[in-house]
């Protein structure tokens, strides 16, 4: 799936597969992850510089190393008129193109069979468990870009997997702080259901305030 562009009426999703210094992929990733407001609900927080983004990005892009088993998918979200024209490997015209969001799918354990209506998995080789992550720049908030891009990513991912394995079963999970109302609304709109709410005793600074470390766990079957 390297280099794939997924299009929606307003957006283009560019798959990121290189965190090499000087690559457009690293630039697109860092453009979002450096923003304090975009990352305010992430326990990781913002990446202060490109070196930090490079290290963080290494965990979310495809890898063939033995200690990184499991599929990893990372896309930058761009407005359609702002997609950079890639020339060769990791180079781009200096046209000011910028990402407005980042989407990731990372390996996750499968939900217990039959739990809350999850499909029974008779053949584990056909089942894929993934965790969805996403964040957007403040300039993109309130415009439906998160819903539009995530819907397109999940549909594209499922379609591609069905080509090689028509019987594939995919469970998508997401973890959201219970005070992050906007993010919860996006996921419910996309058909996710609440699996459980884990109320933590620890207090962390997240979402611009000190809050209990409480997480709503959601899931969706494809």
Image (cartoon, helix red, strand yellow):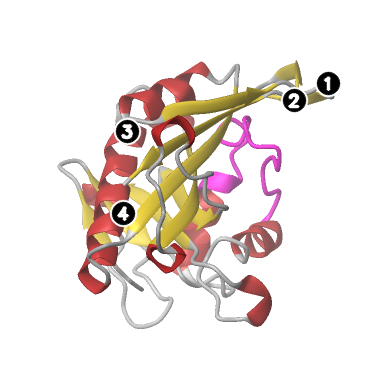
Q: Based on the picture, tell me whether residue 142 belongs to the magenta stretch.
A: no
Tell me where residue 8 appears, x and y as whole percent. Answer: 19, 46
- Nearer to us in this view, 94 or 195: 195
User: Left or right: where does residue 186 sit relative to residue 33?
Assistant: left
Q: CA distance from mark 4 to mark 3?
A: 13 Å
Q: State the residue position of label 1.
A: 201
| Of the pair 54 and 153, the residue shown nearer to us | 153
Instruction: Tell me what residue is drawn at x 22 percent, y 49 percent.
Output: 80
The residue range painted magenta reads 32-49
**Residue of label 2:** 213
Left/right of residue 27 with respect to residue 164 in the rendered view: right
Is any part of residue 113 visible from this angle? yes
Q: Looking at the image, do the residues carrying marks 2 and 1 touch, with CB atoms under 8 Å apart?
A: yes
> Residue at image x 70%, y 37%?
43
The mark lying in front, picked from 3 and 2, is: 2
The nearer-to-camera label among 4 and 3 is 3
Tell me which label, 2 or 4, sits earlier in the chain. 4
Tell me the crowding category of disc 2: few under 14, some 14 to 19, or many 20 or more residues within 10 angstroms, Cα based. Answer: some
* Residue drawn at x 61%, y 45% as measured from the top left: 34
Label 1: state its secondary structure: loop
């Amino acid at each position: 799936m390297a280099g794939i562009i997924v299009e929606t009426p307003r957006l283009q999703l560019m798959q990121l597969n290189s965190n090499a210094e000087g690559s457009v992929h690293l630039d697109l990733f860092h453009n979002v992850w450096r923003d304090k407001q975009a990352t305010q609900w992430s326990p990781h927080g913002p990446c202060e510089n490109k070196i930090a983004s490079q290290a963080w990005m290494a965990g979310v892009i495809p890898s063939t190393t033995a200690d990184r088993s499991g599929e990893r998918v990372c896309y930058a979200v761009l407005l359609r008129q702002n997609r950079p024209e890639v020339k060769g490997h990791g180079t781009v015209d200096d046209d000011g193109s910028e990402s407005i969001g980042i989407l990731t799918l990372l390996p996750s354990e499968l939900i217990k069979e039959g739990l809350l209506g999850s499909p029974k998995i008779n053949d584990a080789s056909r089942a894929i468990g993934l965790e969805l992550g996403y964040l957007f720049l403040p300039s993109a908030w309130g415009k439906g870009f998160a819903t539009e891009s995530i819907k397109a990513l999940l549909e594209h991912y499922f379609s591609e997997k069905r080509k090689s394995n028509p019987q594939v079963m995919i469970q998508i999970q997401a973890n959201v702080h219970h005070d992050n109302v906007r993010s919860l609304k996006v996921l419910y709109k996309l058909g996710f259901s609440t699996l459980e709410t884990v109320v933590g005793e620890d207090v962390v600074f997240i979402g611009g305030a000190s809050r209990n470390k409480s997480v709503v766990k959601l899931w969706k079957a494809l």
